[in-house]
């Protein structure tokens, strides 16, 4: 019987510990009113002392009555909204203390005529067609006629192509789907921007989607720029696939320019647009100055690209020599002890 009582007490104490941190209420929902001014109270329970801050869409319109909280206490959030908010729908502000977050959600009503967009322009390899998909959602309270188009821009911001669609009616709470094909045979590999533009009568709404046209290749994003002389250095090369597909058996061949010194990295498999870090070990014993290294990137034994990089020399200990010296000292000490012991006898 006593064991049962102890077990119940233990469960009670553990449950209290598990529920140690939290906030009540977890959230507030209010409808937007021009110039709305109101206080919101959150009851925080924390395990220790934490700083308080706010983040989210409406953080510039709220003030806290304190900047930190210890244990348990109320936090008063004073909100003063402007005459209008640009974002239609839910606008959020979070009150944060450590890992505990309280939410104030301000809902801005949709006008009589309003639409939402969902745009899809996926990554493909150069020469393949990009399947453009546009979904128009009627979020207002009236049936609307929409005229959509998708504009394609190059990385420099210049307009390349305008893909138009035939307009149509969207019923209340309805959805209208549009699909098109972008032929990329005259394009170059790289990043592009697709911008959906929909005129719904009371205005124009836009949605953006960045997509990439791939080429079979790999590029270097970062690498170990320094090395210590007199030792073997761990060397890292961060690479990125430029291909919308798998690139097999990828490795780097690193050679000091004008020398046979160098190494090959480990071998990895790269997925579509994947980033990985190649690792190798650079034997810099005998080097005492900055060097240039040529880094070749290979797939299945075939070189895809090559780049010359500058490495900075740093002074460092030769740990191998240091270990040898320590070993010699230990052996010499042991022999000296044996000789002294024999002499004493």
Image: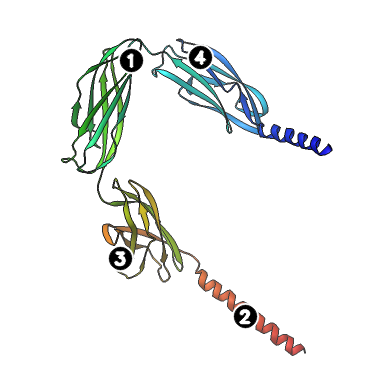
SS of the residue under disc 2: helix
Q: Which residue is mark 4?
A: 30
From the top left corner, tell me how far across and down residue 300 is, in percent: 30, 60
The alpha-carbon separation of the residues under discs 1 and 2 comes to 86 Å
* Residue at figure coordinates x 26%, y 20% from the top left: 198
The alpha-carbon separation of the residues under discs 3 and 1 comes to 63 Å
For residue 204, which quarter of the picture? top left
Q: Which residue is mark 2?
A: 331
Mark 2 or mark 3: whose residue is earlier in sequence:
3
SS of the residue under disc 1: loop
* Residue at figure coordinates x 38%, y 65% from the top left: 289
Mark 1 or mark 4: whose residue is earlier in sequence:
4
Q: Which residue is mark 1?
A: 114
Q: Are marks 2 and 3 in contact (CB under 8 Å)?
A: no
Q: How many marks?
A: 4
The alpha-carbon separation of the residues under discs 4 and 2 comes to 80 Å
For residue 257, the mark is: 3
Indicate the quadrant containing the N terminus: top left, top right, bottom left or bottom right.
Answer: top right
């Amino acid at each position: 019987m006593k064991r049962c009582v102890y077990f119940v007490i233990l469960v009670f104490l553990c449950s209290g510990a598990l529920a140690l941190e939290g906030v009540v209420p977890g959230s507030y929902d209010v409808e937007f009113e021009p110039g709305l001014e109101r206080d919101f109270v959150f009851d925080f329970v924390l395990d220790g002392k934490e700083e308080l801050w706010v983040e989210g869409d409406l953080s510039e319109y709220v003030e806290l009555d304190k900047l930190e909280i210890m244990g348990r206490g109320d936090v008063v959030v004073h909100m003063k909204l402007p005459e209008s908010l640009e974002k239609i729908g839910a606008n959020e502000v979070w009150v944060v203390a450590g890992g505990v977050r309280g939410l104030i959600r301000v809902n801005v009503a949709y006008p009589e005529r309003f639409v939402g967009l969902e745009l899809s322009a996926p990554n493909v390899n150069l020469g393949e067609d990009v399947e453009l998909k546009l979904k128009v959602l009627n979020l207002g309270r009236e049936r609307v006629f929409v005229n959509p188009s998708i504009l394609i821009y190059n990385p420099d911001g210049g307009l390349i192509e305008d893909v138009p669609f035939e307009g149509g009616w969207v019923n209340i709470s309805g959805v209208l789907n549009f699909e098109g094909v972008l032929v990329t045979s005259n394009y170059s590999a790289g990043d592009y921007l697709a911008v959906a533009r929909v005129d719904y009568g009371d205005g124009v709404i836009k949605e953006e989607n960045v997509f990439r046209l791939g080429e079979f290749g790999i590029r270097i994003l970062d690498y170990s720029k320094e090395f210590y002389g007199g030792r073997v250095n761990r060397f890292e090369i961060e690479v990125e696939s430029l291909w919308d597909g798998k690139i097999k058996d990828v490795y780097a061949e690193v050679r000091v320019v004008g020398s046979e010194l160098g190494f090959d990295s480990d071998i990895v498999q790269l997925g579509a647009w994947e980033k990985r870090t190649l690792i190798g070990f650079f034997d810099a014993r005998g080097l005492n100055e900055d060097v240039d290294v040529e880094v070749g990137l290979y797939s299945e034994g075939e070189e895809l690209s090559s780049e010359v990089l500058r490495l900075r020399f740093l002074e460092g200990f030769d740990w191998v020599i240091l270990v040898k010296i320590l070993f010699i000292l230990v052996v010499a000490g042991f022999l000296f002890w044996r000789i002294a012991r024999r002499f004493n006898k």
